[in-house]
Amino acid sequence: MPPEVLRDAKGAAIITVIKAGFVFSGRGGSGVVVARTGKGWSGPSAIGTGGAGFGLQIGAQQTELVFVLNTHEAVRAFSLGGNVQFGGNMSLAAGPVGGAAEAGVTPVAAVYAYSRSHGLFGGISLEGTVIETRNEANANYYGRSVTPGEILSGKVKVPAGAGKLQKALARY
């Protein structure tokens, strides 16, 4: 992912998905979403995804996904604490690479997707993927019940455990 893409982002979601199957398949994953605030980046809000499939498929695969949130509306979708569906209530496109990003191309979608996979499987489709807030994980991490909106707006103090993520994001 070119640095210019993240530099202009309003937020980012990072998630690891594991998919396995033989005729029937299942996938599940977890990660975090962060938003740019007036003071840098918010703390992480926990997210997860899951699903099942059927068809001519075999294999196992781990995929690391980064979703670059290009609009305030994309961040707001994650802030509401419900489900976010790519291809449903959120436009999604493969993110630009190399020269296209360096040229300062205006975002064509609310969300850009980047992925890296390990293992063998027939591919991953993000269309129709639903990502949900993991409220219990957020409560455990922050030590109290907090909403994704409070976290992503910067109203909740960033825990020390998010230091590496904060340091990495501070470069953008």
Image (cartoon, rainbow, N blue to C red):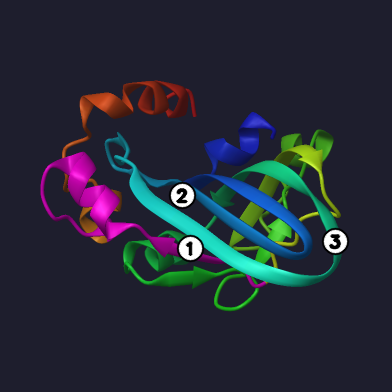
142 in the magenta segment: yes
- Provide the secondary structure element on which disc 1 rests: helix
Disc 2 residue type (three-letter): Lys
Q: Mark 2 — residue?
A: 10
Could you tell me which residue is drawn at 74 percent across and 57 percent down? 21
Give me the disc on residue 74.
Answer: 1
Answer with mark 3 or mark 1, whichever residue precedes in sequence. 3
Disc 1 residue type (three-letter): Ala
Callout 3 touching callout 1 (CB < 8 Å):
no
Give me the disc on residue 57.
Answer: 3
Left or right of 67 in this view: 158: left
Marks 3/2: CA–CA distance: 36 Å
Could you tell me which residue is drawn at 37 percent across and 27 percent down? 166
Residue 44's place in the image compared with 113, above or below, is: above
Marks 3/1: CA–CA distance: 32 Å
Quarter of the image holding residue 146?
A: bottom left
The quadrant of the image that shows the N terminus is top right
- Provide the secondary structure element on which disc 2 rests: loop
Could you tell me which residue is drawn at 76 percent across and 72 percent down? 54
11 in the magenta segment: no
Residue 107 at x, y = what percent?
66, 56
Q: Is residue 109 visible?
A: yes
- Provide the secondary structure element on which disc 3 rests: strand
Disc 3 residue type (three-letter): Gln
Q: Nearer the viewer, residue 71 or 127?
A: 127
- Mark 3 burial class by Cα count in 10 Å: few <14, some 14-19, many 20+: some
Callout 1 touching callout 2 (CB < 8 Å):
yes
- Which residue range is magenta in the image? 128-148
